[in-house]
Amino acid sequence: MSFEAKSAIVTGGASGIGLRVVERLVERGARVVVADRDREALDRVRQSFGASVAPVEVDVRNEDDIAAMVAASRQLGPLSVAVNAAGMGEGHPVVEEDLETWNRVVSIVLTGVFLSVKHEAREMIRHGGGGAIVNIASINANVPTWGSAAYSVAKSGVEMLTRSSSLELAEHRIRVTCVSPGLVETPMAHRTGNMTPEMVQRWLDHTPLGRVGTTDDIAAAALFLASDDATWITGHNLVVDGGLSHTAGPVTRDLVS
Ligand SMILES: NC(=O)c1ccc[n+]([C@@H]2O[C@H](COP(=O)([O-])OP(=O)(O)OC[C@H]3O[C@@H](n4cnc5c(N)ncnc54)[C@H](O)[C@@H]3O)[C@@H](O)[C@H]2O)c1
């Protein structure tokens, strides 16, 4: 998979899944606008990747920031790839959820992706069309977990935004897809308490492939969808979760001969 001389944007590209996507794109020849709100992490990205990246401080909730992010891609060439990975996890059970938290989660996780897709696609159209946008959703788009209603609703929205925009952008030869990770070890997974031994064991009890995901697992899927190997795929949600989403049925192994 070559991304030689391609211009790309990765939101949330200074940490975790987004950072691994940046690394893989740069390894394969792309020049990448790395958009994130974490200034210190962006400085580290600049030191690691030098001229292959253009770090831009962005809050994905702010449309002016998103417009500036897209404008920054013009120094690197016509935009042809975007991976929208910026996100956060926070929340409480519905009856305890406060409106401020709900609005913060939905504005970053869903509205941030809407603004990104809108401006990235406009830029691709401005250059005559063609390109691939990959949104990072979550298995929570389809599988609820305790205390994550706002996040799950927002990720469901990301999946439908992906499908809706894929329909509208096909005539411009722009493909829009999403990747839905299961539990992946990242700074966010540690911050949200998902990497304690007890929590990991609960996840592994429902993960046929028997391990937590890595940022490489997700970056590989995102790069495939962004690549020329996927030119007849659009609107698709690629679930990358070690099989967890398929385990809703009862465990009957000991009852079946
Ligand atoms: N780690 C998991 O288990 C997991 C599972 C499913 C989905 N995801 C999704 O993967 C994506 C990446 O998450 P991660 O686990 O790598 O987390 P991470 O915290 O390591 O990286 C997220 C990045 O997004 C940035 N960000 C957050 N809010 C932002 C904002 N308002 N504007 C700009 N940048 C912002 C952060 O600064 C950070 O660099 C997220 O969309 C997350 O919801 C993660």
Image (cartoon, rainbow, N blue to C red):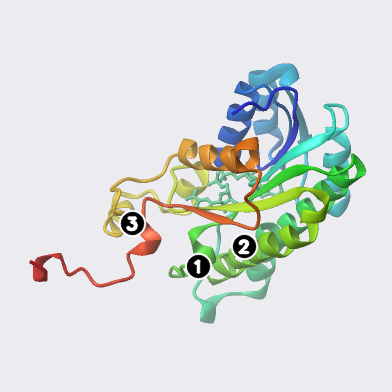
Question: Are there few (<14), some (14-19), or many (20+) residues within 10 Å of tag 3?
Answer: some
Q: How far is disc 2 from disc 1 in space, using C-alphas?
A: 9 Å
Residue 159 circle label: 2
Q: Look at 67% across and 59% down and name the residue there.
A: 162
Q: Is residue 14 visible?
A: no
In the rendered view, tell whether residue 83 sits above or below residue 29.
below
In the rendered view, tell whether residue 39 sits above or below residue 189.
above
What residue is shown with label 3? 203
Taking depth in this image into account, of 176 and 120 the one nearest to the observer is: 176
Residue 217 circle label: none
Q: Position of residue 53 (x, y in %)?
A: 73, 25
For badge 2, the amino acid type reads Glu
Mark 2 CB near ligand 1 (8 Å cut): no
Quarter of the image with the N terminus is top right
Q: In the visual, does 53 lie left or right of 93?
A: right
Q: Look at 63% across and 47% down and name the residue there.
A: 85
What residue is shown with label 1? 142
